[in-house]
Amino acid sequence: MLGMLFTDKECRELDYVLRKELDEMLLDLHDSRLDGDIKQAVGKRYKIIFRMYARMASPKELSRYVMKVTK
């Protein structure tokens, strides 16, 4: 595990970057033009970024980005 120290401004910037990345990946995951392999790769990356964001976000903010599982 790696520990890092951030200033308040850096934390806000990291929060912003992670949220924007999650938003973009959600759009990609709902894009019908992308094939299954690409969506699978985006999904794996989404899970990693989501876990990073979960370490700093409140439950209310985090609930916006919970992926709904469809079968």
Image (spheres, helix red, strand yellow):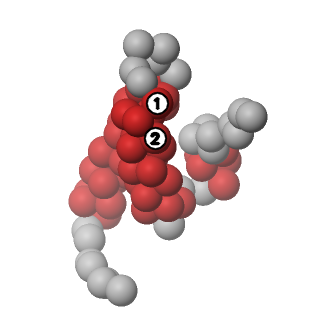
Judging from the image, what secondary structure is the residue with disc 2 in?
helix
Residue position for label 1: 36
Residue drawn at point x = 57 percent, y = 41 percent? 65
Q: Position of residue 66 (x, y in %)?
A: 63, 44
- Please give left or right for residue 69 compared with residue 35 in the image: right
Q: Is the residue under label 1 in contact with that under label 2 (CB below 8 Å)? A: yes
Outermost residue on the top side: it is: 33
Q: CA distance from mark 2 to mark 1?
A: 6 Å
Residue drawn at point x = 30 percent, y = 45 percent? 17
Residue drawn at point x = 37 percent, y = 34 percent? 38
Above/below status of 69 relative to 8: above
Above/below status of 16 relative to 35: below
Residue drawn at point x = 31 percent, y = 84 percent? 3
Number of marks in picture: 2
Tag of residue 40: 2
Judging from the image, what secondary structure is the residue with disc 1 in?
helix
In the foreground, 50 or 6: 50
In the foreground, 13 or 40: 40
Q: Position of residue 42 (x, y in %)?
A: 40, 40
The amino acid at mark 1 is: Gly
